[in-house]
Amino acid sequence: MGIISVLFGNNKTDFKSLVDQGALIVDVRSPQEFASGHIDGSVNMPLDTISSKAAFLKKDGRPVITCCRSGARSGMAQQVLKNAGVEVYNGGAWDNLTQKIQ
């Protein structure tokens, strides 16, 4: 996987199908950024807390799609969750992901 797709999301992933099948969208921005706008149904888990949420997300068993403002933080969160055994996809920027899942 190229560095660009790791950091900014993979354009080949069918995010709409993942969401339709029950994937959880995790927005890793700060609570203030999340409050200013987010994807309906997404949950806010700031990047600095994501490692403490990994066991919960793995136990839940649903695929996870991470997103943030640009895709950089969501790429970092993806790596943390992947290392913890979570099925995870980097959705990149939340506003771009919104368009991909409609």
Image (tube, rainbow, N blue to C red):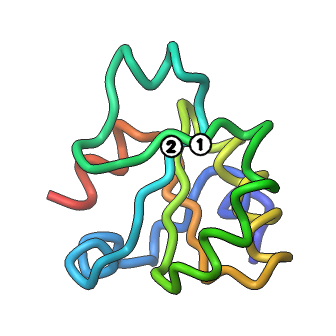
Report if the CB atoms under discs 2 and 1 are less than 8 Å apart. Answer: yes
Secondary structure type for disc 2: strand
Question: 10 Å neighbourhood of mark 2: few (<14), some, or many (≥20)?
Answer: many
Q: Is residue 51 left or right of residue 14?
A: right
- Residue 23 pos. (x, y %): 37, 74
Front-most of 88 and 12? 88
> Which of the labelled discs sits on residue 45, or is there none?
1
Q: Nearer the viewer, mark 2 or mark 1?
A: 1
The amino acid on which the numbered mark 1 sits, given as a three-letter code, is Met
| Helix, strand or loop under label 1 | loop
The kind of residue tagged 2 is Asp
Query: For residue 24, which quarter of the picture?
Result: bottom left
For the C terminus, the quadrant is bottom left
Where does residue 20 sit, x and y in percent of width and height?
Answer: 20, 78
Please name whichever residue, 85 or 59, is drawn nearer the observer in this view of the structure: 59
Q: Which residue is mark 2?
A: 27
Q: Is residue 73 above or below residue 51?
A: above
Q: Is residue 11 left or right of residue 97?
A: right
